[in-house]
Image (cartoon, helix red, strand yellow):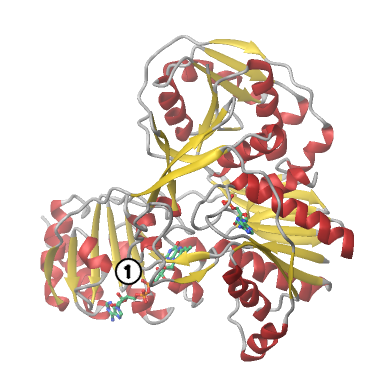
Amino acid sequence: MRILVCVKRVPAPGARINIAADGQAVDTAFLGFTMSPHEECAVEEAVQLVEKHGGEATVLTLGPAEADEQLRYAASLGVANAVLLPITGPDWDPQRTAAAIAAAITELEAADGAFDLILFGNESADSGGFQVGVRVAHALARPIVNGIKGIEVQGDVLVARREADVGVEVYEVPLPAVLGVKEGINLPRYPTLKGRLASKKVAVAQVLPDAEPGGQKMVTLMPAAEQVSATVILGTGPEAAAAVVDMLEEIGVLK
Amino acid sequence: MILVVVEHDRGTMSPASWEALAAARKLGETHALTIGEAADGLVEQIGAFGATAVHQVHDDLLGDYGPELWGEVVAQAVTALNPTMVLTTGTDRGNEVMAHAAAILDLPMVANVVEFGDGGLVRVRWGGSLLERCTLEAPTHLVTIAHHAFAADESPNSATATQLSVQLDPTLGRTVVRDRVERAAGVTLATAPVVVSGGRGVGSAEGFAPLQELATALAGVVGCSRAVTNLGWRNHTDQVGQTGTRIAPDLYIACGISGAIQHWVGAMASKKILAINTDPEANMVTKADYAVIGDLHQVVPAITAEVRRRRASRP
Ligand SMILES: Cc1cc2nc3c(=O)[nH]c(=O)nc-3n(C[C@H](O)[C@H](O)[C@H](O)COP(=O)(O)OP(=O)(O)OC[C@H]3O[C@@H](n4cnc5c(N)ncnc54)[C@H](O)[C@@H]3O)c2cc1C
Ligand SMILES: Nc1ncnc2c1ncn2[C@@H]1O[C@H](COP(=O)(O)O)[C@@H](O)[C@H]1O
């Protein structure tokens, strides 16, 4: 199978998210960077499918030159090829991002053959637009289902599972296909030393993105309202148990 | 006119749809779109939340949910009815269907809106820990609203139903639900009144046994942080947070969890939060309603014992 995974470089905030003075981005001065857990699982799924069915996995991102870090991380887990669509300045809006990714995929497929499966995260960790994968699938005229937590290849059909309020829904999607996956589909591996060394040697291909801005424009970021409540310290160590159970009775949890 | 796409599962309307109808009604004249014959019985319920008309779409292909078909129906409804805004639920299905419609119509789509204002729309980012004000340049605004951001208040109206005809390509049936495995009855992480959650501080998979005992004593369930799922101590179905489950129990007990923002957004809707942590400066402790400073391996069993003792001594 030829599998493509699309990931996005995002900051990894800790206890809180600070906004830059101009209100246009997260203040990343003291932050590391990562990809969404959903996308990490998409990478793991691609590697597992290749281990099982043969073929090759490719990872792609549209982002700053520094997104090389996320591409190489994927490579260290077993992805063979990496593609960067370099941009400078602020994030592109979802329509523009999707158009550029779809065009790049068309170019990659013209050179090396079609991808059987393209994986996206269910939503990006930072902007959470819930749409880039769906737009790319439509541009390529391929089926897509989001929220996938289980993939099984049966010939030229994918059996894909998704969790809903009512239970598990099962889809049978013909290949070539696109899926948006959720964390929990697998347990991503950690890179091995060998994997890390190999990832340094992977040649990152570049495709220059070119697409018109879409109709959604960010004006400013704002902190979410925080409920500030002074914490009542009920005690220290096991001696606090009586005070805890008093509280449970008071709030009506102890029935 | 604002068109609300009603989210339903085989004719059962989702509570998030009530919120969508109530939110839309405050913005202008509201019509509803129901997809599939199974939803025909919803007209009265839709009217109760203030819609004046229901556009019903019937087709043999629409027997069960399918994202591509539903998106195609919404796109054709936009072309036929020309609404100024299409609004639906910011749920797995709602966001998915709207994204399909947006892709077909080549229009922008704004997910998880929490406020409609003069300066533009306000939406959530980072699973709810950050807000974004944005503007939309489009003939029809495609919007989903964040769950729980708008009250599902009623404003009874009698809605009239009409049929809307669509042309559907049978190949789109390729993404219709083929089968489903119903969930066993019982409390789930999302619905439990009490959640006892453990983080890296629990130390091992076995370390969760005392947390399970406390949860059982309080008729609750066990949850965990992502550090725990990554270590393979618990299944991801137990994970609370941005990429896990959002919960809103009466009481959340966070044991050995530092309170990273991505964990906090999943737990912040809890009515009360009790943090048990060795570190008095941990974010979970400073944000919680109550805290016990100490080793969870001693504190948790002591609480369970005290719960049992009090119960036993009741008349
Ligand atoms: C995009 C993104 C999405 C994410 N989504 C999620 C998510 O959905 N859910 C989630 O949980 N995380 C999520 N994370 C990860 C998150 O950032 C944190 O890494 C994670 O929540 C940390 O888990 P923890 O609190 O268990 O571990 P730690 O941060 O290591 O905290 C352990 C805590 O245990 C305390 N402790 C240690 N020993 C004891 C003891 N004996 N008794 C009492 N206390 C003790 C310590 O003081 C500390 O506070 C996400 C991250 C990213 C970047
Ligand atoms: N800049 C990007 N580069 C590569 N993939 C992206 C990018 N932005 C979004 N994606 C992919 O699209 C998915 C959905 O993103 P979004 O629509 O922003 O929620 C993400 O989980 C990624 O897999």
Residue A105, given in percent of the width and then of the height, sits at 78, 57
* Label 1 within 8 A of ligand 1 by Cβ: no
Q: Residue at x 66, y 34 (%)?
A: B101
Residue A60 appears anywhere in the view? yes
Figure quadrant, ligand 2: bottom right
In the image, A252: left or right of A103?
Answer: left
To which quarter of the image does residue B166 belong?
top right
Q: Which of A66 and B68 is in front in this view?
A: A66
Where residue B70 sits, quadrant-wise, is top right
Location of residue B230 with respect to A182 vertically, above or below:
below
Give the residue type that dot 1 points to: Glu
Query: How far across and down, in percent of the image, does residue A82 sit?
Result: 72, 71
Left/right of residue A243 with respect to residue B20 in the rendered view = left
Residue B238, relative to residue B159: is it above or below?
below
Q: Viewer-proximal residue, B51 or A128?
A: A128
Q: Position of residue B67 (x, y in %)?
A: 68, 39
User: In which quadrant of the rendered image does the C terminus of chain B lie?
Assistant: bottom left
SS under mark 1: helix
Marked residue chain, label 1:
B
Q: Please, is residue A11 above or below residue B98 in the view?
A: below
Q: Residue at x 44, y 38 (%)?
A: B113
Dot 1 corresponds to which residue?
Answer: B213
